Amino acid sequence: MAVNTAQVSGRRALHFADFSQLLADVDYIATHPCHTLGNWSVGQILDHLAVSANSPFDGFGGFKISWFTRNLLVPFVKNNLLTKPMKAGFQIPKEATAMIPSPEVTPQAGYEKLKLALARFSSELPKFPHPILGELAFQEWVAVTLRHAELHLSFILPSEIPVPV
């Protein structure tokens, strides 16, 4: 039975100022026993973050929200999405199935894929608009990538931290 991730308690509180802090957390996760509080494994979370981090360079598979939402509602929430923690519980739309990771992905494979994806930010410029936020400046791409990682990595706990009851 699927966990309602909007109601999960005991998640880690994370805030990354830059990719080096994100990578330090991911390095720890990749080299220590961990468990998750949501529906995805450690490997799936890392793989999802890698696919998401690659999307500004490779495209989002045609997924984007409606013109109305993108142009009339998003401008009022864009700053919050870039600067404040993302809320858990968002369901990936059917049009974005490429963002859903395979259950078989290992933590090591997700880790390697994520490191390569983040490295692209140091050598390439994003080419595609964000499917929700539209055109973003480079630093906005970095910010949304960090906020997204904070959300998903908050569901991964080192095994020495007990699962909340």
Image (cartoon, grey):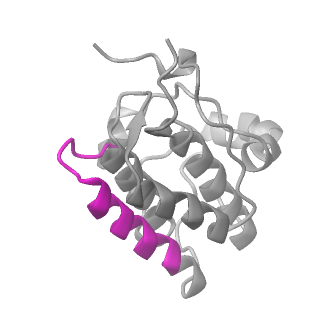
Q: Between residues 16 and 53, which one lies in front from this camera angle?
A: 16
Q: Is residue 55 visible?
A: yes
**Magenta stretch: residue 133 in it?**
no
Magenta residues, start to end: 100-119
Q: Is residue 58 left or right of residue 144?
A: left
- Looking at the rendered structure, the number of numbered marks drawn on it comes to 0
Q: Residue at x 39, y 36 (%)?
A: 35
Q: Residue at x 58, y 30 (%)?
A: 11
Q: Which of the 4 quarters of the picture holds residue 66?
A: top right
Q: Is residue 161 above or below residue 3?
A: below
Q: Is residue 20 left or right of residue 127?
A: right
Quadrant of the rendering where the N terminus is positioned: top left
x and y, in percent, of residue 50 in the image = 41, 60
x and y, in percent, of residue 130 in the image = 57, 56
Q: Between residues 61 and 53, which one lies in front from this camera angle?
A: 53
Q: Is residue 155 left or right of residue 111?
A: right
Q: Is residue 134 above or below residue 79?
A: below
Q: Is residue 140 above or below residue 94?
A: below
x and y, in percent, of residue 28 in the image = 49, 59
Q: Main secondary structure of the magenta part?
A: helix
Q: Is residue 60 visible?
A: no
Q: Between residues 14 and 119, which one lies in front from this camera angle?
A: 14
Q: Which of the 4 quarters of the picture holds residue 113?
A: bottom left
Q: Between residues 155 and 58, which one lies in front from this camera angle?
A: 155
- Outermost residue, left direction? 104
x and y, in percent, of residue 57 in the image = 47, 72
Q: Residue at x 29, y 46 (%)?
A: 101
Q: Is residue 163 above or below residue 136?
A: above
